[in-house]
Image: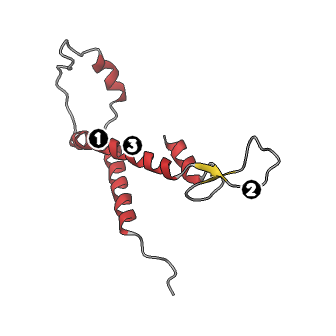
Amino acid sequence: MNTELPEDPQRRRLRERLELIQVRTDKATSWRESTAVLRSLVNREGFVPIKAKLAVEDLEFLAGAREDVLSFAELGLRLLDLHQPRDAGGITSDTAHPILRCRSCMWRWPCPTFRAMSDAF
């Protein structure tokens, strides 16, 4: 007898999208070091008048980077809205520091979801 529930299609699609973004990001070259040099080249119009050699993976990453970052920011905000502390309502000897639980998953605060987000960001 199979006791596993079928995977939720929305959850599966979200996981696939996040994994695709992760793969695309891993293949693209980091621009962190290049941006310091490029900032010094900004002209009076506010642009950097240079030509750069970019790999196909870099172009694919840059093409969707803005939307991906906006999506991640929205995801992070929504998760923060779901996973926030609330008073557990228990009796404690330290009234200044009551026992807190996550409003969404009811784990002791900080919950595993919040800790994972905090570590990642």
Q: Are marks 3 and 1 in contact (CB under 8 Å)?
A: no
Q: Are marks 2 and 1 in contact (CB under 8 Å)?
A: no
Q: Residue furthest bottom?
A: 1
Which residue is tagged 3? 73
Q: CA distance from mark 2 to mark 3?
A: 34 Å
Q: Residues within 10 Å of mark 3 (few under 14, many from 20)?
A: few
In the image: residue 78, left or right of residue 96: left
What is the three-letter code of the residue carrying label 3? Ala
| Residue under the point 21% across and 40% down | 59
Label 3 or label 1, whichever comes before in sequence order? 1
In the image: residue 14, left or right of residue 109: left
Which residue is tagged 1? 65
Q: Hey, which quadrant is residue 105 in on the image?
A: bottom right
Label 2 or label 3, whichever comes before in sequence order? 3
Q: Residues within 10 Å of mark 1 (few under 14, many from 20)?
A: some
Give the mark toward the camera: 2 or 3.
2
Q: CA distance from mark 2 to mark 1?
A: 45 Å
| Residue under the point 20% across and 20% down | 47
Which residue is tagged 2? 90
Label 2 or label 1, whichever comes before in sequence order? 1
Colouring scheme, one of rainbow, by chain, secondary structure, one colour: secondary structure
Q: Nearer the viewer, residue 114 or 84?
A: 84
What is the three-letter code of the residue carrying label 1? Ala
Q: Nearer the viewer, residue 6 or 85?
A: 85
Residue 84: image location, x then y, percent: 56, 49
Q: Residue furthest right?
A: 93
Q: Residues within 10 Å of mark 2 (few under 14, many from 20)?
A: few
- Residue 98, above or below 43: below
Q: Hey, which quadrant is residue 49 in on the image?
A: top left
Helix, strand or loop at label 1? It is helix
